[in-house]
């Protein structure tokens, strides 16, 4: 039977671990899209839609570096209304404040406020350490050098103590046989992992620097299953496989869902249409647990649990490997 795979969200995509994301720098101390979605999930109207079996699904669009527009729609058909829209919400990534549409009055509940504070504290903890910033500064310096010798040596020293997210470093390279010393000055933004050459005033971009920065940012992403992983787990659930009643039907997901869940459905590869009835199940991307979207009933099986554990262990091993490689690269500096 054909199976459709579509992976929108994976382990490294959450924090936009390249040095830009949609034209915006990765901003470690701002809420991620998933974190913003988790706040919207607690909005009373969204909770009511979930309780009534409408299966609220969230879609996100950027309105600038600090604002996210999150639309909540009922993914499960509601015979009492033709509209699937629950509402549109704006989330400030720097404060966690949620507004409905353009309404200046924020939406808050005790549960939302508790989560908002916890998420903001988590975001602040994501900024780079001094040691990581030091590693980036020296990596940037090394990537710009043209002369190297076997016995060369490097040093890097933090200079000054200034308010704000920028740390400044002085770097040096010594070439014993040439009896020379050269140096540079670099500024590292610990909220974005960007490095500026203070002699030229330009940001530094190199494959070496990009690799180190990507590893640092990847380790800050939560260990979540990708959409492809979620489908692989779902293929071990008898209740889902029983829905594939002919050769045209396939398990599908466009990566949409709510917070840290991915919604799965059944579609026809012959007609290209989603089978009526809306999404079938939700997969918790942290654990691999699968539930019926409408009833909340657990669908997980022994096979799906084992597959989820295997995939999550693979993610953990990948992170451990990145951590070792990052340690080796930075310690060598």
Image (cartoon, rainbow, N blue to C red):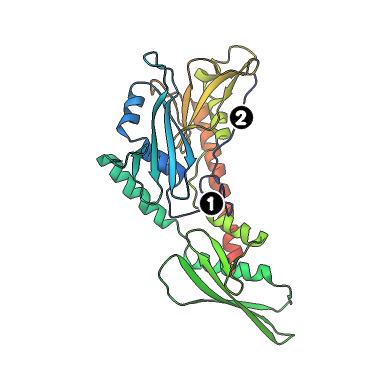
Label 1: state its secondary structure: loop
Tell me where residue 86 appears, x and y as whole percent.
Answer: 38, 27
Tell me where residue 116 appears, x and y as whole percent.
Answer: 33, 46
Label 2: state its secondary structure: loop
Q: Could you say which quadrant of the image residue 246 lies in? A: top right
> How many C-alpha atoms fall within 10 Å of the one at disc 1: few (<14), some, or many (≥20)?
few
The front one of 103 and 179 is: 103
Left of 26 or right of it: where is 151?
right
Q: Which residue is mark 2?
A: 5
The front one of 6 and 69 is: 69
- Asked whether residue 229 appears in the rendered view, the answer is yes
- Asked whether residue 259 appears in the rendered view, the answer is no
Q: How many numbered discs sit on the rendered protein?
A: 2
- Earlier residue among tags 1 and 2: 2
Left of 38 or right of it: where is 153?
right
CA gap, disc 1 and disc 2: 28 Å
Residue at x-position 30% and y-position 41%: 112
> How many C-alpha atoms fall within 10 Å of the one at disc 2: few (<14), some, or many (≥20)?
some
Q: Could you say which quadrant of the image residue 186 lies in? A: bottom right
The front one of 163 and 121 is: 163
Q: Is residue 31 above or below residue 144?
A: above
Tell me where residue 298 appears, x and y as whole percent.
Answer: 41, 24
Q: Is residue 166 above or below residue 31?
A: below
Q: Which residue is mark 1?
A: 24
Q: Is residue 285 above or below residue 157?
A: above
- The quarter of the picture where the N terminus appears is top right
Rendered image: mark on residue 200: none
């Amino acid at each position: 039977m054909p199976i459709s795979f579509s992976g929108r969200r994976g382990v490294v995509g959450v924090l936009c671990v390249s040095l830009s994301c949609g034209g915006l720098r990765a901003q470690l101390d701002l809420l991620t899209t998933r974190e913003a979605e988790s706040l919207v999930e607690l909005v009373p109207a969204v909770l009511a839609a979930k309780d009534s079996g409408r299966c609220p699904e969230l879609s996100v669009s950027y309105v600038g570096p600090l604002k996210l527009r999150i639309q909540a729609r009922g993914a499960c058909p509601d015979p009492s209304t033709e509209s699937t829209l629950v509402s549109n919400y704006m989330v400030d990534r720097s404060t966690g404040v949620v507004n409905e549409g353009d309404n200046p009055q924020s939406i808050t509940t005790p549960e939302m406020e508790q989560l908002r504070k916890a998420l903001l504290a988590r975001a602040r903890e994501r900024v780079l350490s001094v040691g990581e910033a030091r590693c980036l500064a020296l990596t940037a310096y090394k990537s710009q050098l043209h002369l190297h010798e076997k016995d060369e040596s490097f040093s890097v020293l933090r200079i000054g103590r200034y308010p704000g997210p920028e740390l400044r470093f002085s770097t040096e390279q010594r070439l014993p046989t040439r009896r020379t010393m050269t140096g540079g000055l670099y500024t590292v933004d610990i909220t974005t992992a960007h490095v500026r050459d203070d002699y030229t005033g330009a940001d530094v971009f190199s494959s070496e620097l990009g690799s180190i920065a990507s590893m640092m940012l990847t380790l800050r992403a939560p260990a979540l299953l990708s959409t492809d992983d979620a489908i692989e787990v779902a293929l071990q659930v008898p209740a889902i496989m029983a829905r594939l009643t002919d050769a045209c039907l396939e398990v599908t997901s466009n990566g949409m869902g709510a917070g840290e869940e991915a919604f799965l459905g059944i579609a026809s590869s012959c007609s290209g249409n989603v089978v009526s009835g809306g999404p079938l199940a939700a997969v918790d991307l942290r654990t691999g647990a699968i539930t019926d979207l409408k009833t909340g009933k657990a669908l997980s099986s022994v096979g799906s649990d084992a597959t989820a554990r295997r995939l999550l262990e693979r993610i953990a091993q990948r992170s451990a490997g990145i951590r070792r490689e990052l340690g080796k690269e930075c310690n060598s500096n």
